Amino acid sequence: MSLRKLTGMLCIVSMAVCLTACGEDSPKNTEEPEATEATAVSPSAAAVAKKMETITVFTIDASTMSILPSRVKKKEDDDSLDYLVTLVLDNLEDDEIVIDHVEQDGDKAIIVFDSNKKPVSDCDEEMEDLILECFSNSILDNAEGIHSVIFRTDKGAYVSAYKTMKEDEVYASR
């Protein structure tokens, strides 16, 4: 028997097993569980739970020196760039990264870093790249109406030991 025929037969058998297993009815519990003090949810707690949603921001995996998506809770009513940048900062958990301010100019997000802190200074090239990627990816993925990200320092254009960008140079866009 050829390998092609054997593979085809295995696929058919697998599909038959799946369809048979999916078609079986299991006994269903139609009784409502009794609410106890431990399981009862007050209307206000349910309302708070509905207001919370999660979004994906990026963080750094120090063991592999790569960026990873991370699900974080977000207040439903706050979609501002400042709030999104704060979520990224909190997720990075690095007190040496300092944002001077964040602004929006049309469809551009502008993040202004403190020129004496990471990622502008006291940072190796790989870590600088990872930090900038975390901010740009998180903003482009989550900020509605933002199509590009510009990085600057409190002194003007973004200039570090490894990167030199013009004041309005787009770092990343979609």
Image (cartoon, rainbow, N blue to C red):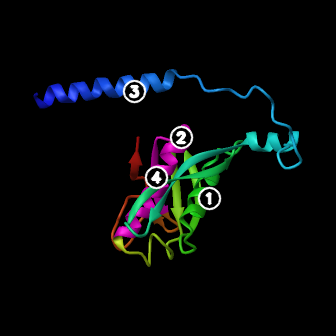
The CA distance from mark 1 to mark 2 is 21 Å
Look at label 4 and name its amino acid. Ser
Determine which of the numbered discs, if any, sits on residue 136 in the image: 4
Determine which of the numbered discs, if any, sits on residue 106 in the image: 2
Residue 100 in magenta stretch = no
The CA distance from mark 4 to mark 2 is 16 Å
Q: Image point 55% across, 43% down: which residue?
A: 143
Closer to the camera in the image, 52 or 144? 52
Residues under numbered marks 4 and 2 in contact, where contact means CB atoms less than 8 Å apart: no
Residue identifier under label 1: 86
Of callouts 3 and 2, the N-terminal one: 3
In the rendered image, the residue lying farthest to the left is: 2
Q: Over which residues does the magenta segment extend?
A: 126-152
Of the residues tagged 4 and 2, which is closer to the observer?
4
The CA distance from mark 3 to mark 2 is 55 Å
The CA distance from mark 3 to mark 1 is 50 Å
Q: Circle 4 sits in a helix, a strand or a loop, which is it? A: helix
Of callouts 1 and 4, the N-terminal one: 1
Magenta stretch prevailing secondary structure: helix
Residues under numbered marks 3 and 1 in contact, where contact means CB atoms less than 8 Å apart: no
Q: Residue 92 in the image: state x and y as whole percent.
A: 53, 65
Q: Residue 31 in the image: state x and y as whole percent.
A: 79, 28
Q: Residue 38 in the image: state x and y as whole percent.
A: 84, 50
Q: Is residue 21 above or below residue 152?
A: above
